[in-house]
Amino acid sequence: MGQITTYKISEMTLEDRPRERLARNGVGTLSPEELLAILLRVGVEGENALQMASRLLQERKGLLGLYRSTYSELCELHGLGPAKAAQLLAAIELGKRIANEDRKDNYSIHAPADVFSLMRLDMLALDHEELWVLLLNTRNIVLDKQKLYVGSVNSSQVRVAEVFRSAIRANALSIILVHNHPSGDPTPSPEDIALTRAVIQAGRLLDIEVLDHVVIGFQAFTSLKEKGYAFQK
């Protein structure tokens, strides 16, 4: 059996090496392939790290596909083992936490787009539905965000009392429901509208206002309040 050749980034010309380009021109100038190649460090037989990065992005259908990949899925890709899969997931998680860092304290909601900005990273990687509730104070500042349900969101499965339990404990003035559609299409279903209507009615009894229900897709969202679904204009 012949010796396997490993193609390294160091074998590329100096001006083409991603790390040198990063140092010379800044990290923002690098392509997704170059950034991924820096994490991979070395390629496999027949591919240097940059070529391997390009192939992986194509196989996973871009950065979003990598973001949505599980550890086991990454380990199955040619050229990735447990160590590199762990490195990729760690880098992705660090990026996610940095993006969320400035939203920890005194993040206020003024429009559905603010909800989308707050929650999209939590939901982009999901291959299933999750229902979250945002708890707000008198200035519409988010006191907390909590995951309530995993699975199909409908009024027959969601206990309305659970939606308000944390809001009552936190003395929240209002709440916003948020859930995702893994299909990427944020169009509300009849079940979404029925659940929203039930929660609004319960909120009136508890004197806790339901400000909105935002459905999140891949790159878009739908506000049920803006569309007039279940909310009185």
Image (cartoon, grey):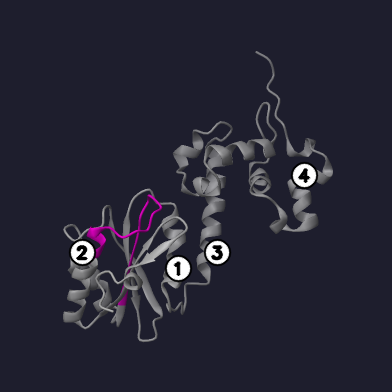
Which residue is identified by label 3?
98
In front of the other: 50 or 110: 110
Relative to 4, is 170 on the left or the right? left
Q: Is residue 80 magenta?
A: no
Q: Which residue is mark 1?
A: 118
Q: Name the residue tied to disc 2.
A: 194
Of the two numbered discs 3 and 1 on the same chain, state the one appearing first in sequence. 3
Residue drawn at 47 percent across, 72 percent down: 104
Lower position in the chain sequence, tag 1 or tag 2? 1
**Comparing marks 3 and 1, which lies closer to the viewer?**
1
Q: Are marks 3 and 2 in contact (CB under 8 Å)?
A: no
Quadrant of the snapshot with the C terminus: bottom left
Residue 140 % position (x, y):
39, 82
Dot 4 amino acid type: Arg
Q: Position of residue 162 (x, y in %)?
A: 21, 67
Question: With respect to residue 215, does 68 lie above or below?
Answer: above
Circle 2 SS class:
helix
**With respect to residue 213, does 180 lie above or below?**
above
Seen at 49% across and 33% down, the residue is 76
Q: Which amino acid type is marked by label 3?
A: Ile
Read off the magenta span.
175-195
The image's mark for residue 228 is none
Which residue is labeled 4 in the image? 17
Q: Is residue 218 left or right of residue 91?
A: left
Q: Local crowd at mark 2 within 10 Å, few (<14), some, or many (≥20)?
A: some
- List x then y, in percent, for residue 88: 56, 46
Whether pointer 3 and pointer 1 mark residues with C-beta atoms closer than 8 Å, the reply is no
Residue type at the position of mark 2: Ala
The disc, 4 or 1, on the residue closer to the chain's N-terminal end is 4
Work out whether 54 lies above or below 27. Answer: above
